[in-house]
Amino acid sequence: MTALLSAVDVQRFYRRGGIFRRGERLHVLKGATLEIGRGKAVGLVGRSGCGKSTLGRILLGLERPDWGSVFFKGKDISAKDGGEFAKFRKSVQVVFQNVQGSVNPRMTAGEIIGEPLRNFFGISKREAVERSRPLLEQVGLKGSDADKFPPHFSGGELQRVCIARALAPEPEVIVFDEAVSSLDMVVQARVLELVQKIRDERGLAFLFISHDLRVVAGLCDEVALMDGGVIAARERSVATLAKTGGATIARMLESLPPAGPGERAFR
Amino acid sequence: MSTALLQKNTVRLSLVLLVIVGAVAVFAPWLGLPDPEEVNLAEKLAPSGPGHLLGTDHLGRDVLARLVFGARTSIGSVFAILLLIALFSTLAGSVAGFVGGAVDSVIMRICDIFLTFPTLILAMFFVGILGTGLTNVILAIFLTHWAWYARIVRGIALSLKSREYILAAKVAGTRGFSLVARHILPAMAPQVLVLATLDIGHMMLHVAGLSFLGLGVQPPMPEWGVMIGDARQFIWTEPQLMLYPGLAIFIVVMAFNLLGDGLRDALDRSGMLEERVR
Ligand SMILES: Nc1ncnc2c1ncn2[C@@H]1O[C@H](COP(=O)(O)OP(=O)(O)OP(=O)(O)O)[C@@H](O)[C@H]1O
Ligand SMILES: [Mg+2]
């Protein structure tokens, strides 16, 4: 069976400078391959700056790989025509780490959540805002919050707004890029609870990018370790990864903040 | 935002002043003033009086009428320049920032060339090529200032490009024109607006300066710089002829600068300025 979403042998360079300046080239991804199966929660861990977010953006179709391809339901997304691409666009959604930065400060929560609704279901702005209210309730906020602007939400609440936006187009995969890392422990736990609940209810597939192994351990069916620009290891759990992942994972385990729930489980 | 803006007395005062000046300029032809270009040598250098509230100049023209119609020229030309810059620089800067790569390098090197020369010298150079006159002054000042704005807009575009909410909007299916209209222009507009307001005074001085040097607005058309130029010869005998247009320039330039400052602070506090400008 083909995976729902996969990156195959993806390479990505970043270069600085233009035609007059020869800038240095940064080889971030060196042939990364990652599959996300239907309804599976995959954790992606690795050291800071190793290219996890870059792989995330490529899987989302926001950046093109310089080499390799991204497949959605067995088809290369760069080969998809307009209608097919729109389907992909609707099915693969995202929640970012920087909560304040991922919403337009000039739009109300209702407009923010309504944006994908307007685009994918062709409804009016007004109708989209009305339809955002039940979504807000699903993520544990109030329907009346649709009329509030981002600065009037706390970080955790705003992340719920972003989750609601990602849920709005009824996607099949959601990429969470460090989605709880900027929140404090208590809020983090609540948001994770919500994510787990959504998973149980909807059977969505997740890519959970994080450098916090505990978060990944509690939530994911599979864990992939990125190191040196490739997916260096892939295991059923963080515990097995700890045994097979070698030096990088050992360093990550060491650098974890002091004891939290679940940590003993894989040490 | 608007309430925060109006909390400062200086901002309120400058707004009131500018509204008055603007209204006078717009409605100048209906204020029952004498013709500002009508020469009457019999009444030259007349003192203030009932017929001529601020007296007359060396050709017997009504000074008040010339001041009022001069406001039209000064303010009108500055807005024309700003409109040109707002359209052209926003386009050039956004293209450079969003497209990037070679396009960006080419646009930026062109900007560098324009930015190398002092603006007044470059403006004089362009007037020299294009010829004198108001239209050419407007063009010259546009040519000497667009690069500066284009650079700033490019900076804003670069910072917006990787902004998560722009990425999130793309994932939410917003593309092309909607992306620009919903997310990009609203983020750029306040910053460009503040810069423009802070620059209005500076541009008025440019127009007046070029006209004063005889390169800009040509007599008999009323303009503040021209009026100062004309009054030069009478600086000892009739100093008020220089004082009135000088004061007019001073007040309007200051009012625009204060308004720009207030606007920046208000937008900054309301979080609408995502980058702090200047
Ligand atoms: N648009 C870009 N232009 C140039 N370099 C970039 C760009 N995006 C990322 N990089 C570089 O690529 C590398 C990988 O970045 P990326 O954000 O993917 O890492 P990450 O694993 O997500 O790190 P973190 O855990 O800190 O989020 C970094 O060295 C970064 O500086
Ligand atoms: Mg990252």
Image (tube, coloured by chain):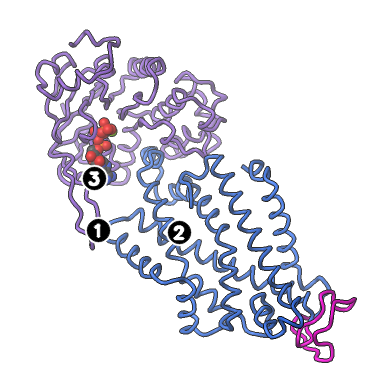
Left or right of residue B195, residue A213 in this image: left
The subunit carrying tag 1 is A
Chain appearing in blue on the rendered image: B
Q: Of helix, strand and loop, which mostly describes the magenta segment?
A: loop
CA separation in Å, label 1 and label 3: 19 Å
Amino acid identity at mark 1: Gly
Q: Nearer the viewer, mark 1 or mark 3?
A: 1
Q: Is residue B53 magenta?
A: yes
Marker disc for residue B90: 2
CA separation in Å, label 3 and label 2: 27 Å
Res. A59 visible in picture:
no
Classify A20 as above or below A81: below
The subunit carrying tag 2 is B
Percent x, y for residue A17? 25, 55
CA separation in Å, label 2 and label 1: 21 Å
Point out the image quarter for the C terminus of chain A: top left
Tell me, yes or no, whether dots 1 and 3 are on the same chain. yes
Left or right of residue A215, residue B182 in this image: right
Pick the residue in front: A142 or A230. Answer: A230
In the picture of the structure, the residue carrying the numbered disc 1 is: A18
Amino acid identity at mark 2: Thr
Question: Which range is magenta?
Answer: B35-61
Q: Is residue A59 magenta?
A: no
Percent x, y for residue A198? 37, 18
Q: Colour of chain A?
A: purple
Amino acid identity at mark 3: Arg
Residue B41: quarter of image: bottom right
Marker disc for residue B253: none
